[in-house]
Amino acid sequence: MYKQVILVLRGHFVPMFLLLAIALSACAAPAAPATSAADSTGADAGPAAGESAATRDVLYVGVQGLPGAMDPAGELSNVGTRVTYSVFDTLIRRDFLNNNTLVPSLATSWERTSDTVMRLQLRDDVTFHNGDPFTAADVKFTFDRLNAPESELVEAAGYFASFKEVRVIDDYTVEIETHGPDPLLEQRLASWGSWIVPQKYIESVGGDAAFAAAAVGTGPYKVVSMDPDNELILEVYEGYWSDLPPVKQVIFRVIPEPSTRVTALLNNEVQIITNIPPDQVPTLEDADNVTLKQIPLANMHVLRYNTNHPVLSDVRLRQAMNLAIDRQLLIDTLWGGKAVALRGHQFEEYGDLYNPERPLTPYDPERARQLVEESDYDGSVIQYATGANYYTNGLQAGQAIIEMWRAVGINAEIRLVQPGESIPVEEGMVGNWSNSSILADPDGALWRGWGADSARQRDEWPAPAKFNELGIEARSTLDKEVRFNNYQQMLDIWEEEAPGTVLYVPVENYAAANDVQWEPYPFYYMDLRAYNLSFE
């Protein structure tokens, strides 16, 4: 039993297996030589002597990974939205630096002309990176593309299932009509999947796949070249409609190992690094040439179970798996107590739709053992799929969780997924994942991730009809009381069905050279626009 050997770390009692996971994480990736990241391209990352302190030729960013392509509606992962955010624009922008206020972007103004119709006025001075003018036709094309029957952009399309029609009124006026009242229409137009893409260009290059390989947007940076395994080079678009950033190029370098990213920053081979695990934080705090930036994410780490797999078909087994996880122990040991425990699948930023009375996700190993014994589980191996570095502490949490499952009679093992590898749907069993609060509303997290149009229901969980009925009603009414009650019932169903579970809200660590003024957001967006990037 995993609790038979206990050690003390930072004032917490820690099982030996978890202590070993932490130690292995710190030791498995020794720091690279000081010149390793720079030598990989032969470039000098630092500003040249005599260069203005306010501008740079190049800003280097060390990341754990890059997306495979640059279609903003197709690359909705953490690594995807990080880099597409500065290449594309939305109609409305969520101002993360000013209390999440919704402000004009490609749309100069908007108004609801009825419960189901919004009219937007568009900027008339915007061009795409290839020189084509931005017009209302591109807005219509963007959303029609997602909702087309042949579209493979299933996740992005789910955000806009309420859309009935997008109408071009004139070149710079567009109307969006929804099937019913949509309380979140403004938020949808400022969030994931709503980045505007160029109709003429996509049609000229032959469709979505060709566009994804050579993307063109309206944002402040254009794509110069991309090698997903190594680096992405962006260049400032001189025709950008707003203020130009104070840098000519941004180069994202793939540096998978956290300790190597830290070394690269300390040696000025890169000037910003992402996804820093807690065990690397003291090194950065002790350095005098970098600044640590910590932010709780509007994101939760979760597990997803393939309930269609024969081994996981018994709900009692899935409930046992959830009850066996000591989330507070993971928070205290892997995250130094800084990650946040969850009261079910909900975020505090929901405001009136958040239920502070909902209990914390329970830990009850005795009940878990009982459920395992009652279930039809035959002792088959349950594979827990995780990448080594994709999620901060993702592998370490997985190693701990499978030991917790073994302690209640569940035979589990890690299936290490390599970069670029995908597991066939029918083979998948357990995987780690994250759900973001993209709309500051349950519709943007619980429904987006697990609702009727989600990949989860398509591939892994045939949800009860009641769950979908409640969700559809909640997203098509302006009555907050109805919405609150519906979402609470949906949470009850989700927890009873156990197609997955919440773990915690992670605290994301970034670091930057002292002379780089940039602030991270509670999403993985890396906003490098002029209002959020400057140099001393």
Image (cartoon, grey):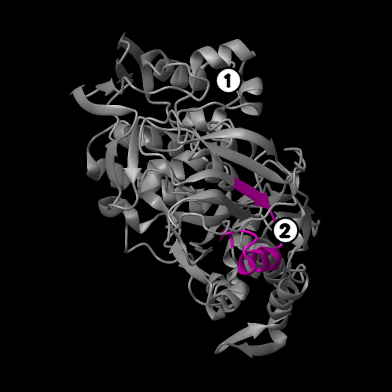
CB-based contact (under 8 Å), mark 2 and mark 1 = no
Residue position for label 1: 151
Q: Residue at x 42, y 28 (%)?
A: 160
Three-letter code for the amino acid on which mark 2 is drawn: Ala
Q: Nearer the viewer, residue 198 or 453?
A: 198
Residue 317 horizontal/vertical position (percent): 65, 57
Is there any visible trace of residue 5 in the rendered image?
A: yes
Q: Write the start and end of the magenta stretch as one range.
A: 251-275
Residue position for label 2: 37
Q: Is residue 370 left or right of residue 486?
A: right
Mark 1: give few (<14), some (14-19) or many (20+) Cα within 10 Å. Answer: few
Residue 520 horizontal/vertical position (percent): 45, 56
Q: Nearer the viewer, residue 365 or 294?
A: 294
**Which quadrant would residue 366 be assigned to in this image?**
bottom right
Is there any visible trace of residue 376 in the rendered image?
A: no
Q: Residue at x 41, y 62 (%)?
A: 343
**Which quadrant would residue 529 be assigned to in this image?**
top left
Q: Residue at x 55, y 90 (%)?
A: 11
**Which quadrant would residue 35 be assigned to in this image?**
bottom right
With respect to residue 302, does 71 lie above or below?
above
Nearer to us of marks 2 and 1 is 2
With respect to residue 179, does 220 lie above or below?
below
Which of marks 1 and 2 precedes in the sequence? 2
Three-letter code for the amino acid on which mark 1 is drawn: Ser
With respect to residue 91, does 37 lie above or below?
below
Determine if the magenta segment contains residue 311: no
Label 2 and label 1: CA atoms lie apart by 39 Å
Q: Secondary structure at mark 1?
A: loop
